Amino acid sequence: MKTNTPHIVQYQGSKRILAPQILRYLPLRIERLIEPFAGMAAITIAVAQQQRASRYVVNDVNQPLIAILAEAIQTPERLISNYRTLWNRQFDFPGGSVEHYYHVRNLFNEGEQTAENMLYLLARCVKGSVRYDRNGKFNQSPDKRRNGTNPDTLADNVRRISVLLKDKTVFTTLDYREVLKTARKGDLVYMDPPYQGVSTGRDCRYLSGIGFTDFVQAVNELNCKGIDFVISYDGKCGDRTYGEELPDYLECQKIYLNAGLSSQSTLLGKKETTYEALYLSRNLRKKEIFHPMQTYLFESQAIV
């Protein structure tokens, strides 16, 4: 019987829905999986569920996100208990649940950046969509139609994730280039860097953006060291493309994954499919390590 992949909380930009497509192009056996831009670690969790890797490195410069993951995996009962207490407080808070959200958000922005505070904000904010102002303050509004993820639902998912990854995972909050320096042959690096164009402006989706030139140089260094990597980067919708493509000299295989109908286009009365690009490293694409069906998909879905 097929088992759904657990997730802690809805998180905009997560690759949870695309994970089955992405995993088609990953080796069946990985010594160590490294995620330098982990977010809520959807790919790490999916790989662990299929028991493809022995060890994991989960990194993100957003420290409260890593705090959630570290507690969920290493001390799940503490996170579950703290979240349950915080979630329940909204129902008897003066002013109601919306005011409770703003109260927690203020505490978070004033320095109480605990795992449970961040988790509650993610569970309660609009579309699970993180937004920060120019000063790095969390400024997303609450979703007034719902109260956030029920603690019982969250508890089940957190416990399942802990079983998959406890004592197998290293958690860091470093610049991605520092993490890449630790990669060695036998590792697989999966990168889902901040989308180009959404790390600047009034309401950023990410605490920190990355420069295109710096990123390309870091990727090239992985190539030179013979380290396998997979990158989710740009994409397209209808006749529009998003983001700058990685340069040809990196010798990556570019594949488009079907991400479904564009909700924005639907609102405008159009029916357009969004495709997200996946880049496979030149070393990885040369290896005969895929299941026969994966090899077929690898060849037939490639768009270069």
Image (spheres, grey):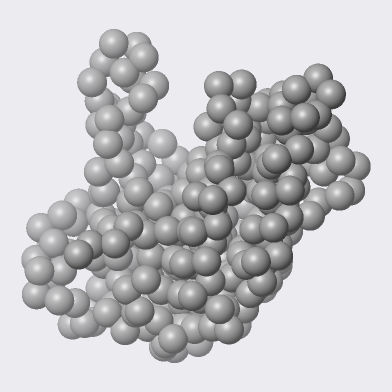
Along the horizontal axis of the image, is 157 left or right of 259? right
Residue 21: name its quadrant. bottom left
Residue 197 appears in the figure: no
- Residue 140: x %, y % from top left: 68, 30
Which residue of the protein is positioned furthest toward the right in this rendering?
110
User: Eyeballing the image, is 62 above or below 183?
Assistant: above
Along the horizontal axis of the image, is 263 left or right of 102? left
Which residue of the protein is positioned furthest toward the top in this rendering?
269
Judge by depth and name the residue closer to the eye, 295 or 244.
295
User: Eyeballing the image, is 138 above or below 71?
Assistant: above
User: Eyeballing the image, is 83 above or below 29?
Assistant: above
User: Eyeballing the image, is 42 above or below 52?
Assistant: above
Judge by depth and name the residue closer to the eye, 260 or 179.
260
Judge by depth and name the residue closer to the eye, 169 or 299.
169
Which residue of the protein is positioned furthest toward the front in this rendering?
92
Q: How many marks?
A: 0
- Residue 200: x %, y % from top left: 67, 36
Question: Residue at (25%, 43%) from the top-left corner?
Answer: 258
- Residue 223: x %, y % from top left: 43, 76
Question: Residue at (80%, 38%) from the top-left corner?
Answer: 104
- Residue 202: x %, y % from top left: 71, 27
Residue 295 appears in the figure: yes
Residue 285: name its quadrant. bottom left
Q: Quadrant of the N terminus?
A: bottom left
Question: Residue at (35%, 79%) from the top-left corner?
Answer: 51
Question: Residue at (55%, 57%) from the top-left corner?
Answer: 155
